[in-house]
Image (tube, rainbow, N blue to C red):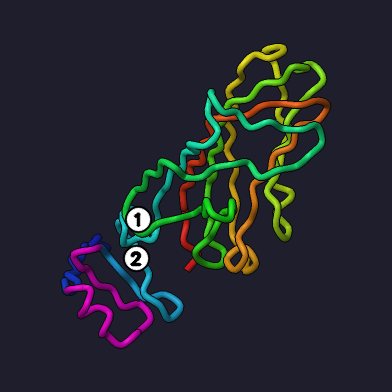
Amino acid sequence: MVKNTSYKVQVDVDSDEVRNAYQIEEGAYVTTSSGVYTVWNGEWVKLYPQGGASSGLGWVRYDDTQYTSSNKLALVDGVQVNLPNNGGNTYRSHDGVDYYNPATNKLIGDNLNDTYILTVTFKASSPNANQTHLDFQLVGNDYSRVANSLGYFKGNDVTQNFHRLYQYYVDADFVSDGVGIKITSDGGSSVLWDVIFFIQKVQNYG
């Protein structure tokens, strides 16, 4: 006769300081005040919770305060420029996280193969909307594939809201040099303002 049997396993509960002093052993399992950890491939890996400052994940919102409805950025037909964002107002999930550098106008990454989601919003208009569109593109190494064309649908000189999401992982060049965010008005001129970048780090590779 076969019976199902359940077992209760009680793991150690220690401080993170004690955990970090442990000898690394594959399969080790411990609970601390910051979460539940195991050793995988020679390193401590956090199993739970996946959010919060100690997880290495987070989000940052960067609001441009230079180009507004009273001071719009003029885009010349066919001229690629940085999509401006001075980070004049910045909001973070917690201190110590940054995924964009307003001084260089570049996205930045923490570690090789980490993954991110970039949300870009702004307002724009064109005096010749039926023949003009905007081209968005990340510039740096092999990231030019993260791009798309944005059309005007509301007519000449009518304010249009743009909102797009882009997913990317970071390679070694991204970590060392960052990646630019570019915009081009094609087919005619445009004006652009109220730029916001909302960037989420959604996965640590390590």
Say if 2 sits above or below 94 in the image.
below
Along the viewing direction, whichever of 108 and 142 lies nearer the viewer = 108
Residue type indicated by callout 1: Gln
Q: Quadrant of residue 48?
A: bottom left
Residue 141 located left or right of residue 47: right
Query: Residue at position x 46%, y 48% from top?
Result: 200
Say if 124 sits above or below 62 in the image.
above
Q: CA distance from mark 2 to mark 1?
A: 7 Å
Mark sitting on residue 50: 1
Q: Which residue is mark 2?
A: 46
Q: Quadrant of residue 12?
A: bottom left
The x, y position of residue 104, in whole percent, is 58, 55
CA neighbours of label 2 inside 10 A, class few (<14), some (14 to 19), many (20+): some
Quick one: SS at disc 1?
Answer: loop
Region rendered in magenta: 15-34
Q: Are marks 2 and 1 in contact (CB under 8 Å)?
A: yes
Quick one: SS at disc 2?
Answer: strand
Say if 97 sits above or below 177 in the image.
above
Along the viewing direction, whichever of 116 and 83 lies nearer the viewer = 83
The x, y position of residue 205, in whole percent, is 50, 64
On whether residue 158 falls in the magenta region, the answer is: no
The x, y position of residue 52, in whole percent, is 31, 54
